[in-house]
């Protein structure tokens, strides 16, 4: 498949040392690429370089086969970058910020009106759009920034923690949008909201200390290391009897009793199936399970490598 | 360049209330300086040679206000723009290249200073009852125009690299203001003898004020002074462009 973004031996260092070290990777056109890792792993720096907002110290970056630095003027129009911090003028109203962005992006007036109003309605920002962002909640500021980035309908989306601070409605709208763009846009997303991004990401990388520790699909993730199976049972009230009843089931590695919720870590789905059989459904509010926990995977991956 | 102008035009869309504030404070500042130096000091020092105090001081008033405004806007706005990142990122994400942002910001600060030089010149003409010829004001504007390029570049570098806004205030109050007062604002520098004082005569602020004054009063064009100012501005542009862009792409 054609590569939309290619990095070759890219390194970046600040005063304290290397933030990215000799990174080589390609992001295929139309794919959704998830970048994960602990805080300080280099995710935001990587995304900033991919967006051409930061120049790497060493190595080469190609966006749609055009080398950067050198062709930024051409490629910038095709990139929509949402950094992990605000990108609006706090003393202009939300609408004025959108107008400013549209003028800078040279979005035609009628197209801007149509697109901005539709996005504002989707994200339900109508009530505050004519106020200054200093009056906004954290989530509303994030929504305003997301709308700014989506205004020009860019071909490549680079999103750094896009779900940060969003309420459930905005999260659902953005999630649905990203799912709908699978195969159409190239999306690079860094987020700790694994349960959301695992619904649409085609490929994952785990960064640590500026190096890629894992590169592959969820399937590869599940097969590469022995990631535990995690089930959550929410009871109407604390249920000590249930915990007592499952303690002899083989394959349970840990039971975490958190008030009304019981989290069971098991080594297989069969084991969890036996646990479910012990349940009195009248006492249960909800039941959930994860066949793979990405956070557990990253922890195990890094601990196996001695980090 | 086209995109740089987009950035400038965004600033030109300032709200009417902001423009009114600028107009009001320029009027107050020019009036107070005019009253202090052209009215009060005139009583104290009735004559300086054959020239009236008004003619001597006016270049200083116009240059003083516009240069201070251009520098202060450049240093404080650059500081906010670069350090807080969100404004720089907003325009960067909108597709402007660092070099375009640099040009746009330079023009923005320079225009802000020029607006105040023009306003100040007009107010001074009004206060003097239009006894000062317009050609004199034009002469002062010419040197101010070049000098402000240098001043905005210095402001932009300091704003981009010094994170503490208290230091910015100190550079205005403890460096720029004394330099303006020592630039021939009150007493013409060429009239003071000695090597020590001739060093001050070469300061950019002195070149702006003295250059404008020599042309407006005596009709003498200080080619060397203007050339020196242009060279300094060129060096400042080259240096500022390099460091400002470096800061933007970090």
Image: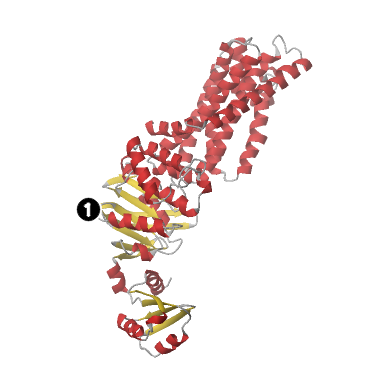
Q: Is residue A215 left or right of residue B146?
A: left
Q: Return the residue nearer the eye: B246 or A285.
A: A285
Residue A159: x and y in percent read 38, 53
Disc 1 target residue: A2
> Quadrant of the rendered structure where residue A163 is?
bottom left
Q: Is residue B244 left or right of residue A278?
A: right
Examine the rendered structure and indicate whether residue B93 appears above or below residue A233. above
The residue sitting at the front extreme is A282
> Quadrant of the rendered structure where residue B97 is?
top left
Q: Is residue B151 visible?
A: no
Q: Return the residue nearer the eye: A145 or A22.
A: A145
Examine the rendered structure and indicate whether residue A111 appears above or below residue A123. above
* The C terminus of chain A sits in image quarter: bottom left
Q: Is residue B83 left or right of residue A107?
A: right
* Secondary structure of the residue carrying numbered label 1: loop
Q: Return the residue nearer the eye: A245 or B169.
A: A245
How is colour applied across the structure in the image?
secondary structure
């Amino acid at each position: 498949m054609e590569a939309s973004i290619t990095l070759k031996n890219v390194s970046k260092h600040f005063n304290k040392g290397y933030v990215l070290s000799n990174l080589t990777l390609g992001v295929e056109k139309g794919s959704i690429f998830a970048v994960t890792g602990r805080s300080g792993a280099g995710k935001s720096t990587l995304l900033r370089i991919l967006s051409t907002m930061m120049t790497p110290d060493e190595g080469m970056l190609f966006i749609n086969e055009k080398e950067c630095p050198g062709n930024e003027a051409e490629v910038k129009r095709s990139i929509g970058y949402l950094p992990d911090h605000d990108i609006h003028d706090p003393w202009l109203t939300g609408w004025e910020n959108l107008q400013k962005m549209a003028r800078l992006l040279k979005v035609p007036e009628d197209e801007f009106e149509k697109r901005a109003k539709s996005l504002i309605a989707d994200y339900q920002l109508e009530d505050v759009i004519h106020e200054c962002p200093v009056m906004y909640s954290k989530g509303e500021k994030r929504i305003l920034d997301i709308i700014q980035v989506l205004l020009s309908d860019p071909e490549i989306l680079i999103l750094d923690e896009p779900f940060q601070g969003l309420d459930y409605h905005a999260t659902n709208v953005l999630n649905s949008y990203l799912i709908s763009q699978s195969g159409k846009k190239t999306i690079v997303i860094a987020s700790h909201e694994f349960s959301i991004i695992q619904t649409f990401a085609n490929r994952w990388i785990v960064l640590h200390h500026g190096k890629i520790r894992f590169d592959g699909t969820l399937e590869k993730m599940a097969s590469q290391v022995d990631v535990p199976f995690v089930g959550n049972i929410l009871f109407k009230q604390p249920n000590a009897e249930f915990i007592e009843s499952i303690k002899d089931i083989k394959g349970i590695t840990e039971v975490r009793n958190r008030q009304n919720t019981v989290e069971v870590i098991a080594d297989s789905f069969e084991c969890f199936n036996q646990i479910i059989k012990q349940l009195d459904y009248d006492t249960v509010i909800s039941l959930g399970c994860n066949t793979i926990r990405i956070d557990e995977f990253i922890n195990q991956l890094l601990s196996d490598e001695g980090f | 360049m086209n995109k740089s102008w987009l950035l400038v035009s965004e600033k030109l869309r300032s709200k009417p209330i902001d423009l009114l504030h600028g107009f009001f404070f320029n009027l107050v500042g020019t009036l107070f300086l005019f009253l202090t130096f052209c009215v009060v000091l005139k009583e104290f020092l009735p004559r300086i040679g054959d020239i009236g105090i008004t003619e001597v001081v006016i270049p200083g008033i116009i240059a003083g206000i516009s240069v201070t405004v251009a520098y202060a806007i450049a240093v404080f706005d650059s500081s906010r723009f670069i350090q807080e990142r969100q404004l720089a990122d907003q325009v960067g994400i909108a597709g402007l290249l660092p070099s375009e942002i640099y040009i746009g910001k330079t023009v923005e600060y320079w225009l802000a200073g020029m607006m105040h030089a023009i306003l100040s010149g007009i107010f001074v003409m009004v206060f003097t009852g239009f006894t000062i010829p317009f050609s004199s004001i034009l002469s002062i504007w010419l040197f101010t125009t070049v000098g402000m390029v240098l001043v905005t570049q210095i402001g932009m570098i300091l704003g981009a690299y010094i994170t503490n806004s208290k230091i910015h205030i100190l550079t205005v109050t403890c460096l720029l203001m004394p330099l303006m007062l020592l630039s021939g604002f009150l007493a013409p520098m060429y009239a003071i003898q000695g090597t020590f004082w001739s060093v001050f005569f070469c300061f950019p602020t002195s070149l702006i004020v003295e250059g404008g004054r020599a042309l407006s009063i005596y009709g003498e064009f200080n080619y060397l002074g203007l050339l020196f100012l242009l060279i300094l501005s060129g060096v400042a542009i080259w240096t500022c462009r390099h460091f400002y862009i470096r800061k933007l792409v970090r």
